[in-house]
Image (spheres, helix red, strand yellow):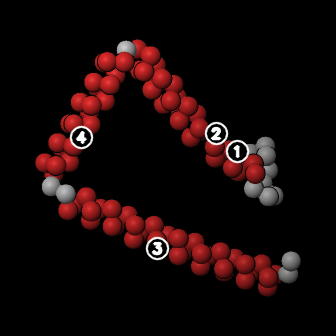
Amino acid sequence: MSRSQLSAEIAALDLELTARRTRLLVSGRERVERLRAVPPRTLLLGGAVAGLASGLVVSRSGPRFQLFCMQGIRLWRMTGLFLPLLLRAEEPGADPAL
């Protein structure tokens, strides 16, 4: 590829990145505004109900469900550690040793 083609590709990627970042910022602002529209008492009550419901599920199902949840949390943490490494290794031109 020539230098001008690479510069054009970088400029196009920069525009795409700027557009994605703008969409992400707008989405974040919309979420914050939606949460601000909900009264704090409703959020607290919803959290309390969700905690009570999950506590009842765990207490009624016994240790097997709790073990299942703990294994899921461990798997989620391991995925968070290894997924970026796997994705980086799949990129063309990436050094798999990194």
Contact flag, marks 1 and 3 (Cβ < 8 Å): no
Of labels 2 and 4, the one closer to you? 4
Q: Who comes first in sequence, dot 3 or dot 4?
A: 3
Residue beneath disc 1: 86
Identified at 28% across, 25% down, the residue is 55
Q: Give the distance between the C-alpha atoms of the residues marked 2 and 4, in whole angstroms.
A: 31 Å
Of labels 1 and 4, the one closer to you? 4
Residue beneath disc 4: 47
Contact flag, marks 3 and 4 (Cβ < 8 Å): no
Q: Who comes first in sequence, dot 1 or dot 3?
A: 3
Q: Give the distance between the C-alpha atoms of the residues marked 2 and 1, in whole angstroms.
A: 6 Å
Amino acid carrying mark 3 in the image: Thr
Please state if 14 lies on the left or on the right of 66 as rendered. right
Picture coordinates of residue 10, whole percent (x, y): 69, 76
Q: Which mark is residue 82?
A: 2
Q: Who comes first in sequence, dot 2 or dot 4?
A: 4
Please state if 53 lies on the left or on the right of 73 as rendered. left
